[in-house]
Amino acid sequence: SNQARVTHRDALAQLLEPGVKQFTVAELLEWALINHIPCGHIKNLEEVFNDKTARDLVREEVIEGQVTKRVTSISFDIN
């Protein structure tokens, strides 16, 4: 079950973190690829919104005089 799978997640993270921090994301991804381990880079929000495609999903709207921004849930253009 998922509950059993994550029981020791925090302890495992504490054990792995010092070793993992010695490498760049690119180095870890390359190592995983060479060893046939499926993985991917999980971007933080700054990395996500550095991409023009992601920035194009941001919608601005004025609500009660306040400018608000949100990310649209529709990620494709029918045109």
Image: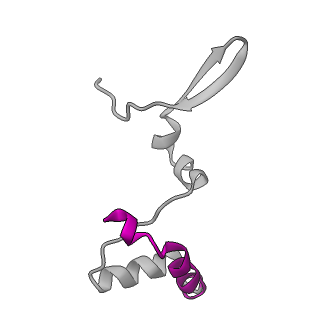
Q: In this view, does 3 lie above or below 16?
A: above
Q: What residue appears at the point 56 percent right and 50 percent down from the top-left corner? A: 50
| Horizontal relation, residue 77 to residue 23: left or right | left
Q: Which residue is outermost to the right?
A: 65
Seen from the viewer's position, the closer of residues 17 and 65 is: 17
Q: What residue appears at the point 35 percent right and 64 percent down from the top-left corner? A: 2
- The C terminus - image quarter: top left
Q: In this figure, what is the number of numbered marks?
A: 0
Residue 63 at x, y percent in the picture: 65, 14
- The N terminus - image quarter: bottom left
Q: In which quarter of the image is residue 29?
A: bottom left
Q: Which residue is outermost to the top?
A: 64
Let me know if residue 79 is in the magenta part: no
Let me know if residue 2 is in the magenta part: yes
Which residues, given as a range, are shown in magenta? 1-21
Secondary structure that dominates the magenta span: helix
Q: Is residue 42 above or below residue 36?
A: above
